[in-house]
Amino acid sequence: MDIRQLRYFIAIVEERKISAAAERLHISQPPLSQQLKTMEEELGSKLVERSGKHFEVTEAGKALYKYALRVTQLMEEAKIEVKEVGKGVNGRLTIGINTFSVVKLPEILHKFQKQYPKVTYKIQQNESAHLCKLVRERIVELAIIRLPLELDNLSVLHLHSEPFYFITSKKRKQTGDEVSLADIQNDPLILPSTEGLGVHYVIMEAFSKFQLHPNVVGECSDISLLMDLVSSDFGSSIVPETLLKRHKGYPLHVYKISSDPLSASVGLIWLKNHYLSKTAQNFVDLIKKEKI
């Protein structure tokens, strides 16, 4: 049996006459009678019995009618859900975010949720290089990362560039509100990333431009721990502006880096030349509109 036959049977049961059921279904009576006969032969059971001018449903027919209602209802629900997913009204947004995240991301997600309240979310946090891997492996569709990185076979939407700042504990007061890389090269630095990753590369490359050799005493990608270490005078650090906006309240001195403004780009990525779900497309459109 197929879904069409089940709909025919529902009409026969509810109308109790072939003629009335045929009129409801907008088909002629002979094909409908033939469909009923075909179902009975396939199931090996009598489904309806004539009682005067009307049909009475047999016990076997009642059992089929119960399941026919369920199946047709599920089919209608499936059609509605598939259409909604296709439009991005329903579905799942899978997105990776960099360890430092984006300050306005919670605000963007709230707006997206308001527009698409049926969408569910899978949000993974990790280093940018690993997020690229997750996108390539289709574990997440989108990711917000920090550049520079190798982005072959990935599409990139540039979001913004942001400056980096030098931070120390309250015990390490510098002169003025700005410092140069030369001024801080001998300070014990804890980098907010690990070797081979984007932020680590940006910082070390900035020193390298001036042939400076920073005193790197550690690396720490756990941002809360990094802020605790710096504020307790374990060492100093160079961090992106986002980090300072998201982790407020620490007893720190914050300095602009004047010699060669240190900055890094943030981008939204997805797999190039591959299908992007409508939910993900809608999120990309919102990101473009909000210009984060």
Image (spheres, rainbow, N blue to C red):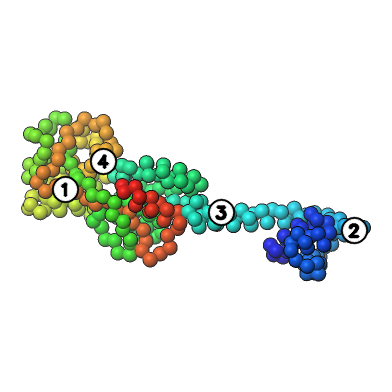
Expressed as whole percent of the image width and height from the top left, the position of residue 107 reads 37, 41
Sequence-wise first label, 3 or 2 = 2
Give the residue at mark 3.
Answer: 81
Give the residue at mark 2.
Answer: 53
Q: Are marks 1 and 3 in contact (CB under 8 Å)?
A: no
Q: Are marks 4 and 1 in contact (CB under 8 Å)?
A: no
Depth check: give the residue in front, 133 or 106: 106
Depth check: give the residue in front, 115 or 246: 115
The kind of secondary structure element at disc 2 is loop
Sequence-wise first label, 2 or 1 = 2
Up the image or down, 83 lies above or below 223; here it is below
> Of the residues shown, which amino acid type is indicated by label 3?
Glu
Mark 2 Cα shell of 10 Å, populated few (<14), some (14-19), many (≥20)? few
Q: Is residue 243 left or right of residue 71?
A: left
Give the residue at mark 4.
Answer: 243
The kind of secondary structure element at disc 4 is helix
Give the residue at mark 1.
Answer: 262
Residue at the image point whose x is 19% and y is 32% from the top? 252
The kind of secondary structure element at disc 3 is helix
Expressed as whole percent of the image width and height from the top left, the position of residue 212 reads 8, 50
Query: What is the C-alpha distance between the residues marked 1 and 3?
Result: 48 Å
Query: What is the C-alpha distance between the residues marked 4 and 1?
Result: 14 Å
Up the image or down, 71 lies above or below 251; here it is below
Sequence-wise first label, 4 or 1 = 4
